[in-house]
Image (cartoon, rainbow, N blue to C red):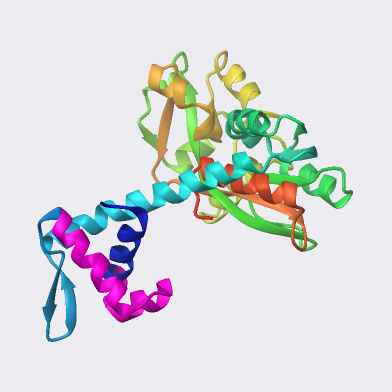
Amino acid sequence: MMNEFKLLVFHKVATGGSFSKAAEDLYVSQPAVTKQISSLEDELGIKLFERNNKGIALTAAGKLFLEHTGVILAQYKRLKNDMSLLSEQVSGELTIGASTTIAQYVLPPVLAQFRQANPSLKLTLLNENSKTVEDLLQKHEINLGIIEGLPANSALQYTLFIKDELVLITHKSSIYYRLEACSLNDLRKSDLVLRENGSGTLEVFGDFIRQYGLKLDEMNTLIQLGSTESIKLFLKHADAIGVVSIQALKEEILSGEFKVIELEEGRIFRNFYFVHQKGTPEKLVNNFIAFLKNRYNVQL
């Protein structure tokens, strides 16, 4: 019968290219590894490995099986993590400070699930820009920050969460809606709506255009607003282009209400980071980080 251990043995042998190394990694004997592989091949009715002058190699069936086992083992790990987190209920208070995009579009569904798994926990989410989140951490007013943009405070510890993309958007009623793409030079002459100073979104956009010899104060900025939702509402009533996270517009882009204008110089990527006081975070913070990473299928 196929089970997790049998798949793990196969995966170790296939990726390491050695029965003895797999046995060493798994703390079992080499005959035990050989037995598991033979059992697996008998069960499947096909050879997964063949011997050559360099040792062993995957057969065509083995290569295909390796693709599937990688996915299956990752799902096993995620399932076990989920069960572990659900079985280790925590209590107390967790106050999270998050940049606007993260607070509005990334965290709410996960917070609901985490609260359901930990009913005695008191959760608070503060929606602030990246600079303010860092300040709140240093004042010990929040337990954890999740921010956009680049790590900027050497007194704090940053850990990568996920990647995000900034896009140029315009509303279907705008004169810019006909555009499929534009250059930064075209954009410099267009009416722009940007986030406020201190925003991670503005910082990343500024860093991107600086690579091409442009500065934020050289752009034709109509207005700077304090949230992505404000930018979206403004664009519904203005001939202008906004710069926002793709996370904020998935449904509106699919419906055609908003359109992404491609930038000829390339795509603008950024990272979302966990940020906390230096040293090992408290257990409650660690549990939440693990839970969130698991939901976004991030390697733990």
Q: Looking at the image, which is closer to me, 177 or 185?
A: 177
In the rendered image, the residue lying farthest to the bottom is 53
Q: Which secondary structure class fits the magenta region best? A: helix
Q: Which residue is rendered at x = 29% and y = 72% of the image?
A: 33
Q: Is residue 163 above or below residue 95?
A: below
Residue 96: which quarter of the image? Answer: top right
Q: Is residue 75 visible?
A: yes
- Residue 126 in percent (x, y) is at 77, 33
- Residue 175 in percent (x, y) is at 44, 19
Residue 156: which quarter of the image? Answer: bottom right
- Residue 252 in percent (x, y) is at 46, 20
Write the start and end of the magenta stretch as one range: 15-43
32 inside magenta stretch: yes
Q: Which residue is rendered at x = 11% and y = 64% of the image?
A: 47
* Side (left or right) of 49 relative to 247: left
Q: Is residue 297 visible?
A: no
54 inside magenta stretch: no
Q: Looking at the image, which is closer to me, 162 or 260?
A: 162
Q: Quadrant of the C terminus?
A: bottom right
Q: Which residue is rendered at x = 24% and y = 69% of the image?
A: 35
* Side (left or right) of 47 relative to 201: left
Report the number of numbered marks: 0
* Side (left or right) of 192 relative to 27: right
Q: Looking at the image, which is closer to me, 136 or 286?
A: 286
- Residue 91 in percent (x, y) is at 78, 38
Q: Looking at the image, which is closer to me, 211 or 99?
A: 99
